[in-house]
Image (cartoon, rainbow, N blue to C red):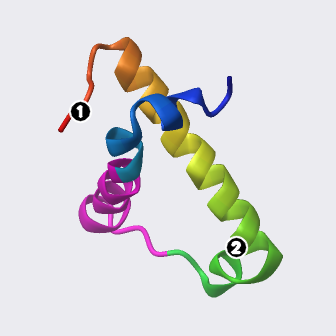
Amino acid sequence: NLIKPAGTDTLLTYLMPFFAGLILRGILNIQYPEWIITGGVGLLKCLLFALLCVASTRLLNKAGVRLKL
């Protein structure tokens, strides 16, 4: 149930990291320090980021946003 939106709306879930990267790096100009993107902490960050993308997809689906081919 936690990752169900990733299976039901795969295109939106696939595009979420690109939108998040645009917001974090392009607009807010946030740069991660080296220790956050490497090693075990980097793996944990990736897991949390993936769950955040799925949660964002779930919220967008509830708001009526769906992407279809």
Q: Secondary structure at mark 2?
A: helix
Locate the C terminus and report the quarter of the image it occupies. Answer: top left
Main SS, magenta residues: helix
Q: On the image, which quarter does residue 35 sit in?
A: bottom right
The label on residue 45 is: none
Image: 67 above or below 52: above
- Which of the 4 quarters of the picture holds residue 66? top left
x 28%, y 14%: residue: 64
For discs 1 and 2, the disc positioned in front in the rendered view = 1
**Percent x, y for residue 52?**
56, 42
Q: Position of residue 31 (x, y in %)?
A: 46, 75
Q: Quadrant of residue 57?
A: top left
Identify the magenta region: 15-31
Q: CA distance from mark 1 to mark 2?
A: 30 Å
Answer few, some or many: residues within 10 Å of disc 1's Cα (few below 14, many 20 plus, some between 14 and 19). Answer: few
Specify whether 49 is left or right of 13: right
Q: Is residue 18 magenta?
A: yes
Amino acid type indicated by mark 2: Gly
Number of numbered discs: 2
- Identify the mark at residue 67; answer none if there is no mark: 1
Furthest residue toward left: 69
Residue at 68% in and 56% down: 47
Q: Check the image and name the residue furthest to the front.
A: 69
**Quick check: 20 left or right of 42?**
left
Mark 2, residue position: 42
Q: Residue at x 67, y 28 (%)?
A: 2
Between 67 and 57, the one nearer to me in the picture: 67
